[in-house]
Image (cartoon, rainbow, N blue to C red):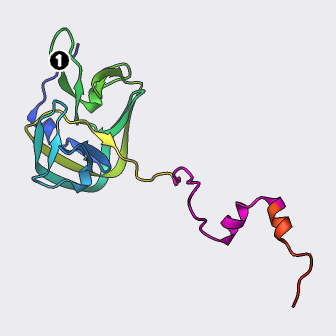
Amino acid sequence: ARVHEMHPSQRRVQCFLSNTAFRTPERSFKVVQELREGDCVLLTDGVVAQVTQVKRHARATRSLVELVTNQASLKISDNHRIEVPNVEGLRPSPWLARELRVGDQIIVGNRSRPLTRVRHFTEGVELIRVCFQPDGVVEAYVIPTYGLHVRGSTNANAMPNNLFEMLAQIPEDELLQAMPLQYED
């Protein structure tokens, strides 16, 4: 098992990418780019933590890691702290994202899951540094930038939006019966 002590210099660039979201005490989600000092998030143990600092780092080429399990994935700065489950009766502990390898266990939801893919790469991104008090474990969710265009279930009692929709609901034989045999001017 790896034992990890973090040097203070490693703590300075632990940042999130845009569209990373956290649960609020109201159980809704708030994306990192909307967090402000004084906002609150919900830690995984149910404790409410206050946002004490938010710092946006301008878009630049950054070292990132994409961590993938069968249940979730996250892109994050390469020296962000990732909670790793206990080994040999020890409490869970943080490892730097860049230290993780395929097969290592991380915590997803409330379970230990193996990493199925770990990708180290650089990309031009804006990073956002957030500090919480207390400095506990938060669950990070990825909110997609775009969504699929879909509709809800059809409502049989809904009025058609236009004449073509209305006519499409009438069976052809009824339309033929309603058609006059002769037109008058």
Q: Is residue 4 magenta?
A: no
Depth check: give the residue in front, 10 or 67. Answer: 67
The quarter of the picture where residue 181 lies is bottom right
Residue type beneath disc 1: Val
Q: Position of residue 140 (x, y in %)?
A: 27, 39
The answer to whether 149 appears left or right of 171 in the picture is left
Kindly indicate the quadrant of the structure image that contains residue 72: top left
Picture layout, residue 146 above or below residue 23: below
The one of 39 and 181 positioned closer to us in this rendering:
181
Residue found at x 42% / y 24%: 116
Determine the residue positioned at 40% across, 48% down.
Answer: 144
Q: Left or right: 99 with respect to 179?
A: left
* In the foreground, 122 or 134: 134
Query: Could you say where residue 129 lies in the image, as x and y percent from the top left?
Result: 19, 48
Q: Please state the horizontal and vertical placement of residue 153, each as a whole percent of the image.
A: 54, 49
Residue drawn at (38%, 22%) of the image: 102
| Residue at which label 1 appears | 3
Extent of the magenta region: 149-173
Work out which quarter of the rendered image holds the N terminus and state it: top left
For the image, the number of numbered tags is 1
Give the SS element for disc 1. loop
Residue 162 is covered by the magenta coloring: yes
Rendered view: 42 above or below 18: above
